[in-house]
Image (cartoon, grey):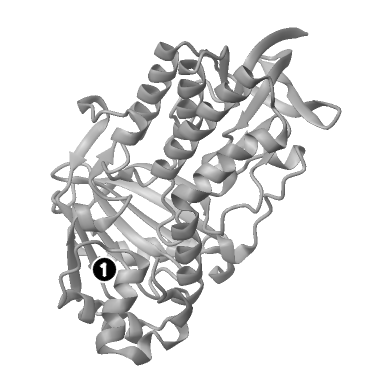
């Protein structure tokens, strides 16, 4: 068995994991980042839309290597075809840049390496190790060889299917209403307006939406997310998307360059994301926007915070739950209120009829909101159609 000793072990080299490794290393910690796949960033399981708003906070500079397209904003379509256009600043964390996600993930891992982190590929954890209730590392395999990594702090960045948190006794289970099944094509030879990311709402995608994110003049990611509890069978997601594409002349002529399927959590954040010697970040901590299903920005922000706290814990010689709770307080102060509000809104939105969606989009298209949040959207609708939001009264308190 191969044995490695390090200060900080990060499990998973997605955006959250690479950010955690980068900032732990910058803080002076010996840091090891492990990734179960043979290539960071591949295969891609993402709509690839992201904003610029969080990048400076995380030390990420836009780079032509991973920018497929830069958009002006988003178009949000009601079931009757009515459209609401919002600019990039208004649109939120999924609009601004359409990524080449594999290159983006590699670039973030490069940042971690330049900061001093080591990386092992084709390396996975099969369990955690503990001493007196504190997580002290993992056991697993690297390139088929048995492996034990001894670490003073472990950061779980192992995504939607996270095992690290469950092994440590943190509650990471999901209900079917808090999971969206997703499927996406990259379609070529289509007609699309590369200035906008498009979102289509209503019964065409029960409990979710359809998206078209342009990657060029005639190439786009075209995908669907459907609440798992709304599906009748495993093939429903694909059949819903295929039927919708067939009705769009500009898309129906397209041919797929690839197809990806998966799932995304749309739940509340976990009640607890730390224990002795361990922190969870990004998708593993369920820090996904429950309305959009987007998680890159929150993943990077939480990874940065966790990496910083890990380095501080090592300097203090204290990896107790009490010390690591600094991370939990930090991410909750940064994003919890928005995530909880959006989860509550998601719970209501999945019950809306196409007619209500039509009326909401028509109302919003008439107003000019400086920034779109759940609160500002609902307040705008309340002013003209209070009956449409009477069931959402608890979301109409000041954020």
Most extreme residue toward the bottom is 387
SS at mark 1?
Answer: loop
Q: Position of residue 239 (x, y in %)?
A: 44, 63
Q: Which residue is at the front of the view, 331 or 19?
A: 331
Number of callouts: 1
Query: Residue 366 appears at what percent x and percent y?
Result: 15, 78
218 or 323: nearer the viewer: 323
Give the left or right position of residue 346, taking residue 165 as reference. Answer: left
Residue found at the far right of this picture: 132
53 vs 12, nearest the viewer? 53
The relative height of residue 244 versus residue 386 in the rendered view (above or below) is above
Residue at 75%, 38% (x, y): give it: 168
Residue wearing tag 1: 247
Where residue 152 sits, quadrant-wise, is top right
Left or right of residue 325: residue 288: left
Q: Is residue 81 visible?
A: no
Q: Position of residue 137 (x, y in %)?
A: 72, 22
Which percent across, then down, holds residue 241? 38, 61
Q: Is residue 318 visible?
A: yes
Is 148 situated left or right of 131 in this image? left
Graded by Cα atoms within 10 Å as few (under 14), some (14 to 19) or many (20 or more), the crowding at tag 1 reads: few
Q: Quadrant of residue 202?
A: bottom left
Residue placed at 16% from the left, 75% from the top? 367
Pick the front one: 173 or 8: 8
Classify the position of the N terminus by image quarter: top right
The residue at the point 16 percent across, 45 percent down is 218
In the image, residue 307 above or below residue 51 = above
Q: Locate the C terminus and report the quarter of the image it occupies.
A: bottom left
């Amino acid at each position: 068995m191969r044995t490695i000793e390090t200060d900080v072990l990060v499990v998973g080299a997605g955006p959250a994991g690479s950010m955690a490794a980068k900032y732990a290393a910058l803080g002076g910690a010996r840091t090891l980042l492990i990734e179960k796949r043979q290539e960071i960033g591949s295969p891609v399981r993402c709509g690839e839309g992201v904003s610029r708003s969080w990048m400076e906070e995380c030390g990420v500079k836009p780079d032509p290597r991973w920018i497929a397209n830069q958009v002006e904003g988003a178009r949000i379509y009601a079931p009757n075809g009515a459209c609401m256009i919002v600019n990039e600043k208004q649109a939120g964390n999924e609009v601004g840049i359409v990524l080449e996600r594999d290159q983006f993930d590699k670039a973030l891992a490069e940042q971690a390496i330049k900061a001093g982190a080591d990386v092992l590929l084709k390396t996975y954890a099969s369990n955690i190790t503990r001493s007196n209730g504190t997580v002290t590392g993992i056991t697993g395999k690297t390139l088929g060889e048995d492996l034990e990594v001894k670490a003073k702090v472990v950061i779980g960045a192992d995504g939607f299917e996270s095992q690290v948190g469950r092994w440590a006794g943190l509650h990471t289970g999901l209900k079917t209403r808090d999971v969206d099944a997703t499927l996406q094509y990259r379609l070529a030879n289509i007609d699309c307006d590369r200035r906008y990311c498009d979102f289509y709402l209503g019964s065409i995608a029960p409990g979710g939406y359809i998206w078209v994110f342009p990657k060029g003049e005639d190439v786009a990611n075209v995908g669907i997310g459907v609440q798992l509890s709304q599906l009748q069978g495993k093939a429903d997601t694909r059949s819903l998307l295929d039927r919708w594409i067939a009705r769009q002349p500009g898309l129906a002529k397209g041919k797929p360059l690839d197809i990806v399927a998966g799932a995304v959590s749309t739940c509340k954040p976990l009640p607890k994301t730390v224990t002795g010697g361990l922190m969870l970040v990004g998708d593993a901590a369920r820090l996904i926007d429950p309305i959009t299903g987007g998680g890159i920005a929150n993943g990077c922000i939480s990874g940065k915070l966790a990496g910083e706290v890990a380095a501080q814990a090592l300097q203090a010689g204290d990896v107790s739950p009490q010390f690591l709770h600094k991370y939990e307080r930090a991410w909750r102060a940064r994003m919890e209120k928005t995530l909880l509000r959006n989860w509550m809104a998601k719970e209501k939105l999945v019950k809306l009829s196409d007619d209500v969606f039509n009326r909401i989009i028509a109302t919003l298209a008439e107003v000019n909101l400086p920034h779109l949040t759940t609160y500002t959207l609902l307040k705008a609708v309340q002013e003209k159609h209070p009956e449409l939001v009477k069931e959402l009264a608890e979301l109409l308190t000041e954020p």
